[in-house]
Image: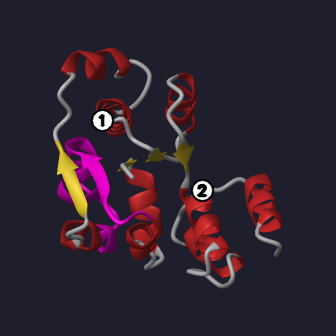
Amino acid sequence: MIIVSDTTPLIGLASIGRLDLLQELFGEVYIPQAVFDETVTFGRENSKAKQMVSNASWIHVVEVKDRLAVNVLLDEMDLGEVETIVLASEMNADWVLMDEKKGRRKLSQLNIPKIGTLGILLKAKEIGLVSVLKPEIEELQRSGFSISPLLVEEILDAAGE
């Protein structure tokens, strides 16, 4: 299974100490250089994410080849999202980890399956890697992760909480 991730799920999960869920769910995760740079090289606020991502041997940085596609999409989204989408297309990814609305819309247009941070936590609960979601979501919110109350309600409902 080929999984490509954008920045936000990496930072979100790392901020609550649950980056390991990605390895447990997917084995390996691929990220474009721009996502590595946003998370590790130029990562501003989250030193936990910097350290966890740079130390994760199962996260692989891959250079995006189609720079023209990147340049065309830069009008719509930031570099990390654009490179994630282009890399996912180049690698024929099974899933893309992304939270941002514009990026998710583009993935839908390209028929590339996507899952966000809360979806990852829900999937982890469904297979027994997380016992209760509500504290995980609350911790995400405390760490500065912006989540709509409606989405929280939907995820908790889907989790039976």
Amino acid under label 1? Answer: Leu
Above or below, 121 relative to 147: below
The circle drawn on residue 45 is none
Q: Locate the C terminus by quadrant.
A: bottom right
Q: Which of the two marks, 2 or 1, is nearer to us in this view? A: 1
Residue toward you, 82 or 58? 58
- Residue 126 in picture, x, y percent from top left: 66, 72
Circles 2, 1 touching at the beta carbon (< 8 Å): no
- Residue 156 in picture, x, y percent from top left: 77, 67
Amino acid under label 2? Answer: Ser
Question: Which quarter of the picture shows residue 117?
Answer: bottom right
Question: Which quarter of the picture shows residue 73?
Answer: top left
- Residue 83 in picture, x, y percent from top left: 30, 34
Residue occupied by mark 2:
146
Give the residue drawn at x 24%, y 71%: 56
Above or below, 110 relative to 57: above
Indicate left or right for 61 with 15 as reference: left
Question: Is residue 50 in view?
Answer: yes
- Residue 19 in picture, x, y percent from top left: 40, 71
Extreme residue in the front direction: 1
Give the residue drawn at x 58%, y 36%: 101
Q: Which of disc 1 and disc 2 is earlier in sequence?
A: 1
Span highlighted in magenta in the image? 26-49
Query: Within the magenta stretch, is there residue 36?
Result: yes
Question: Which quarter of the picture shows residue 49?
Answer: bottom left
Give the residue drawn at x 36%, y 37%: 88
Q: Secondary structure at mark 2?
A: loop
Residue occupied by mark 1:
87
